[in-house]
Image: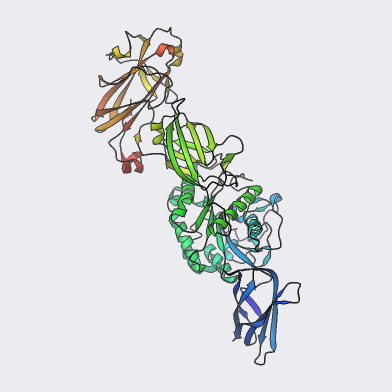
Amino acid sequence: MEIISGLFDTMVLQRSAKGVSNAAFSGSCDFSGDVTATVMRRGSKKAVLKSRTVGRAADGRLSGTISGVPTGGPYDIALCIENASGACRDTLTIRNILIGDVWILAGQSNMEGVGYRKDSMKPHPHVRAFYMDDRWGIAEDPLHRLWTAVDQVHVDLIGGSRIPGSPHIGVGPGLSYALHMRTQIGVPQGLICCAHGGTSMAQWDPALRDQGGKSLYGAMVRRFCKNGGSIAGVLWYQGCSDADPSLATIYTERMKTLIASMRKDFKRADLPVVMVQISRVVTWKNAAASWNMVREAQRLLPRAVRRLSVVPAIDLSMDDFIHLAGFSQNRLGERLAYAMLELTKQKKGLMPPIALSKVRLVRDPLNLWANVILEFDHVDGKLRADGMPWGFELSMKKIELTNDYIYRIDLDANRVILRTAISAIEAESMFLFYGFGTNSFCNITDSADRSLPSIGGLRVGKPRAYTDYVRKMRISPLLPLSGTIVNAEYPGNTAFPEREFGDGFLNLHNEIGATTPQELIVYYAVTVQCPADMRLAVHLGYDGPVKAWFDKQEAFLDAAGTNPCVPSKGVFAVAAPAGTHELVIGLATNGGKAWGIFLRFERTDVDAQTIEKGPEYYSLPRGV
């Protein structure tokens, strides 16, 4: 008698909802008759289940189901093929069996495990693994021993070599996960190892299932079937290989297809899946935009797929340019266990993964800049950070950072307060990131050591069609001001010398600061070209009394303008037919306390849908 699937020495059998085994097995044999089973607790002479019929042997094949063995163990299961008179014609004992929860580990290298083995956790006899050579054993790192794989795909993907991997690496999140699950619920844990480093969603395509062990998905299904066709859930860590502009946009649909296929092939429509949101990579700066796209797709995936949780890893340390450190993998395993326990409701009082629930803008009453306040749901305890909280960015563009705008981050229970050097109206149009690009520094967790999710780029408010800040203008000398800014007149000749500034603040502080307290005025002038008829909002920042003329007509006045110089402090509308226009701004020196201005334009006649499509779909004015 030989067992081919479902029942092996040292294995973990998946428990049923009633907490007992329901394990199907099959094999080959030389005799026919009823198959009986006796289940003994290992080391005891007392039967847990006395001899009873569990299956049938005929025509060289046998099959059956071991039902009713309580969760726990270990057990020895003695099988017997009986003849018509009840005598055993063939026997086989399967030894050291546990009944508990079995999980599939799948994805690419960070699930495979490439952390340093010096950080490996101590194995436990009730935590076991189905290694890639189709043998069960006590789970210890490395779990994914690709060079021993039965399935050809794993050998092909390492170049056909069966040379053992480095003795120094091999820690993934699987062992930590299983150890924490066993500690939390007291149930034996089994891991079916299916991951392979560097693999893409295309390589995990369920359409390749019929290739069996020659495809990743087919190999995973084969290993599932070989172990009796019953598991508790799936852990998935993949996405780095899909951080490409042509692939990131279809990541969500591919993940939906993958999970739907697993639920069908694993014969469980409510199969729980916990996946990791990809972490960091060094030296791949050109992949920043698509790296964020994959992370954002993963963050939002639970909205499209039920019974799915996504666990962030953006704050974890690394052992090389792309792989999590062994000690970080251990932290990740505990986070995965927390998420699975919450998802499957096996432990009360746990929270789903932290999720952004609200973004609002307020004007700081002391310095007039914008505070961006983020509220998060499902925070366990309160948000915290080791050292200065960091990791958030605001950008005028969705795929790249345009400047540094955040000078401090405060944590308040479940809120994050971003203190910025921009106006509220400006912040409203920006994109929010937590963990921008490939190698950002993030360090905010809750009291249960669960990270905020990577976010980006999420528009803070409504889309706006802004130009960049004007950096080059024609600037007059400091001139006498008769009376106040109210009395200032359009200067007439604006052929002033042209100056260019390094950023959006057109700073004349050195010149103004060297003047006497006598009130003076300086004029800024720019020619504006409009390729089409436009309705514009002119966004002006200033720290002194100010007056503006558009095409020689007075368009704006703030006689009480003073410090600080906040972008978009004053906003005024102008009509700009196609062609060339002129904007002139007069800034009074404010008793020597004025520094300069900010200037940018907004088209207000472009609909939100067009703005979201990108600036290539509409034209903007251009300062020359």
Residue 441 locus on image (x, y percent): 56, 39
Residue 596 locus on image (x, y percent): 41, 19
Q: Is residue 451 above or below residue 232?
A: above
Residue at (62% x, 52% y) in the render:
334
Residue 418 locus on image (x, y percent): 49, 34
Q: Is residue 531 above or below residue 38?
A: above
Q: Nearer the viewer, residue 447 or 216?
A: 447
- Residue 107 seen in render: no
- Residue 380 seen in render: yes
* Colouring scheme, one of rainbow, by chain, secondary structure, one colour: rainbow
Q: Is residue 36 above or below residue 416?
A: below
Badge count: 0
Q: Nearer the viewer, residue 21 or 225?
A: 21
Residue at (53% x, 57% y) in the render:
343
Residue 16 locus on image (x, y percent): 58, 69
Extreme-front residue of the structure: 349
Q: Is residue 115 above or below residue 83?
A: above
Q: To which quarter of the image does residue 590 belong?
A: top left
Q: Quadrant of the N terminus?
A: bottom right
Q: Quadrant of the C terminus?
A: top left
Q: In the picture provided, is 554 more to the left or to the right than 37?
A: left
Q: To which quarter of the image does residue 563 belong?
A: top left
Residue at (48% x, 67% y) in the render:
264
